Amino acid sequence: MKEEQLRDLLNSMSLKEKVFQLVQIPGQYFLSGVADTGTKTDGRPTDEELALVGSTLGIFGAKTTADIQMQHLKRHPHHIPLLFMHDVVHGLRTAFPIPLALGASFSPELVKQCSAAAAAESAASGLHVTFAPMLDLVRDPRWGRVMESFGEDPFLNAKLGKASVEGFRGCDGKMPEKGRVASCIKHFAAYGAAEAGRDYTGADLGGRQLREFYLPAYREALNAGADMVMSSFNAIDGIPATGNEELLRSTLRKDWGFEGVLISDWNSVGELATRGVCSDLRQAAKLAMHCGVDIDMCSFAYARHLEALVCEGEITEAQLDSAVFRVLELKNRLKLFEDPLRGVTPAGEERTILSPVSRALARKAVCECSVLLKNTGKQPLLPIAPERKTVFIGPYVDSKELHGAWAVSTDPEDTVSIRQAAEEFARVQGRQFIFSKGCRMTCREDLGPKSEESAVMAFREDAFPPQIEISDDPMLKEAVAAAESAETVVACLGEHRLMSGEGASRGELTLPEDQLKLLRSLQLANRNIVSVIFTGRPLDLREVCALSRSVLLVWMPGTEGGNGILDLLTGSAEPGGRLSMSMPYCLGQVPVYYNHFNTGRPKAENTKIPYYVSAYIDIPNSPLFPFGYGLGYTDFSVSGFELGAEKAELRNAAEAGPVTVRAMVKNIGPRCGQTVVQLYMRRPSAEALTPVKELKAFQKLALDPGEERELVFTLGSDAFCHVSADGSLHADKGTYRFTVGLNSESEDWKSLELL
Ligand code: BGC
């Protein structure tokens, strides 16, 4: 439809029709034939209102969406199609590893491919918009939603965010491509700075922190064409994001020029009243509208109050029209006026969902994202030598709940468990494995792992475990006997999938207590333990590391989890992941992240007694495993690191470089493998503190044994500039220092003067 036609349509709409384009309701209202017949309550649309609603969320399926759409078109006075939105965060039916795992892949290409595959399944199922990627920078593993983020680094988040947006919608300019979906980035902004890791709190950030660390990834994703933005639940410096004029109007709309649709998070308009910045729902609707929130997700504030606010002159009709026009425009860009079903058919859906190609990609992704934390000994246990008698023990051996809390539309029945994959491997290779559960996933597993409520209770009880005497436990006895009979024990342990995700903040970062007891007992029976850890967040893994010779972190690996893990254990693939979030030494250290500001009293390498320096007296400052860390099945060396120049010119406040950085990387180990070479920079301090290190470039590469390659990184203005507190881009003159290495602890520095 041409722009004038869209304007004519808008002009022909009644006030109520306009308002309801801005109302989003849960899909269940359409499914259950809906509504009651006229009484208006806050949470339920009437039949008449339902016919006018602009968008819905949470339902998918080619037939379901087509039926609803066709009925809606008939009922709507102007035949305006509905938008179907949904959280396809890391896969619809094929679950890819959780985003925190994808962050560890350090591979924009992989992230793009996984998002594209998720978009293909979504589009084939009648969806138009995904609420993804989530681009909240995260530093505190207590927060359950770290699993949805790419990690703690602004540069990596921005690169992967861009790749994800391009994967979801395609790179073809204004319009999401055919067979893809529009991308709604979230949660704007700084939801990841959750205070004390507790969900829905505030972010106590100054403007400089916000701009330097938290905002860049959202911005890059918008530059990559993201169609929508979701405002977040949190407050920033006391102002809730959904009612934050400076954030939404000044930064997003004015400074960044965002012209797409801005949607609230679920009931975050209503929560403006709960939080007390508005006296009631009507004031909440007014404030959100004033800040430029176009769609009210599920709070009903717009549905109940916007019409009156316009009639009474508190919101102008022009303001309302701009918001409605943006929604109509999105529908138009998706070509819904011409083809309200976007060519979706049940046959096409059947072909696309869980296709062999998606499954193969998901399996590869497991290998690219898993991080090998430990593999010690003259003859490391991994990969497991074929002749070794191996047992698989632990609550994750048989589990099909490998998809994490946000793959909300997957069916665990589609998932390949470790046991299934191992049995298939054994069948093909003519080998035999033994399997044993050893203990329950959580103390209250008996209440049913699928009940969310029971899972939540289970975590609580794990924090205060009942005094169960487990030495008489038959499950444990069987596992210990199995461990005694074997040469290698693969202990498959981890958090329950619902221990991370929205609302799942934790105050402890250890494995459930029963699992630790199991591991201790296994280690007494057999020292050759490979621990395979499933988790949605960084954990305190000190004890696991002490009790195991090898530790493989597989996150929540998704539908092909079992197959990918077997590929890694048996060595047909090697772990390609490097941590994108620091693995804390212990709980008392969080938040711990590599790119912190320097202090006036840094702890020097050789400080013996850490008094009167910035340090703990009882634990190290460094995390157990740093950002960028991960092992493979071979070793690499980095040498010959040099800068292309010792001096460079700052041409104006924000133009410097390009500067080249070179280094030689060599595979010095026994087999081919891949690594991630990382370039970090330290800026000169000027009017403000600078991070001790900042990732500026990285490259993932595979080399054969003995093969050496020269890497050249070219740094342009982007690398030198940072965002000043007033929002402008700025580079400082002075000494810049660079280091190249295989994780963020690299300390081989070279300097460059920016004149
Ligand atoms: C979450 C969002 C999600 C929305 C819709 C909210 O609770 O915070 O991330 O997109 O629900 O499901």
Image (spheres, helix red, strand yellow):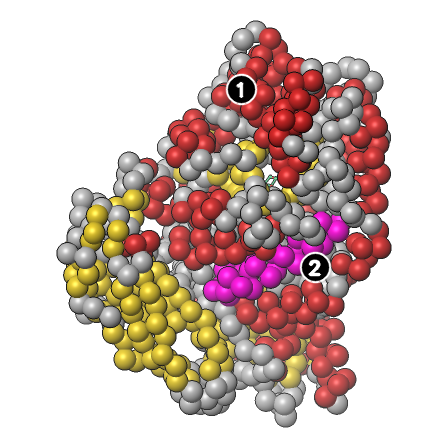
* Residue hosting label 1: 319
Residue 238 place in picture, x, y as percent: 39, 29
Judging depth in this view, the residue of 386 and 116 nearest the camera is 116
State ligand 1's quadrant: top right
> What amino acid is labelled 1 in the image?
Gln
Residue furthest to the top in view is 312
Q: Which residue is mark 2?
A: 94
Q: Main secondary structure of the magenta part?
A: helix
Task: Give the quarter of the image for residue 745.
Answer: bottom left
Q: CA distance from mark 1 to mark 2?
A: 41 Å
Total marks shown come to 2
Name the residue at 19% across, 57% down: 649
Q: Give x and y (percent) for residue 233.
A: 51, 35
Residue 675 visible, this angle: yes
Instruction: Reply yes or no: does residue 108 show up in magenta.
Output: yes
Per the rendered image, the range of residues in magenta is: 99-125
Indicate if the residue with disc 1 has its beta carbon within 8 Å of ligand 1: no
Q: Residue at x 44, y 35 (%)?
A: 257
- Amino acid on which disc 2 is placed: Thr
Q: Position of residue 605 (x, y in %)?
A: 21, 68
Depth check, mark 1 against mark 2: the one in front is: 1
In the image, 257 versus 642, the foreground residue is 257
User: Which callout, 1 or 2, points at the residue further toward the start of the chain?
Assistant: 2
x, y percent for residue 681: 28, 61
Q: Is residue 31 left or right of residue 568?
A: right
Write down the quadrant of residue 742 in the picture.
bottom left
Residue 56 falls left or right of residue 98 = right
| Residue at left offset 31%, top offset 38% | 727
Q: State whether residue 472 appears in this view.
A: no
Residues at circles 1 and 2 in contact by the CB criterion of under 8 Å: no
Residue at x 72% of width, y 64% of height: 415
Residue found at the very far bottom of the displayed protein? 387
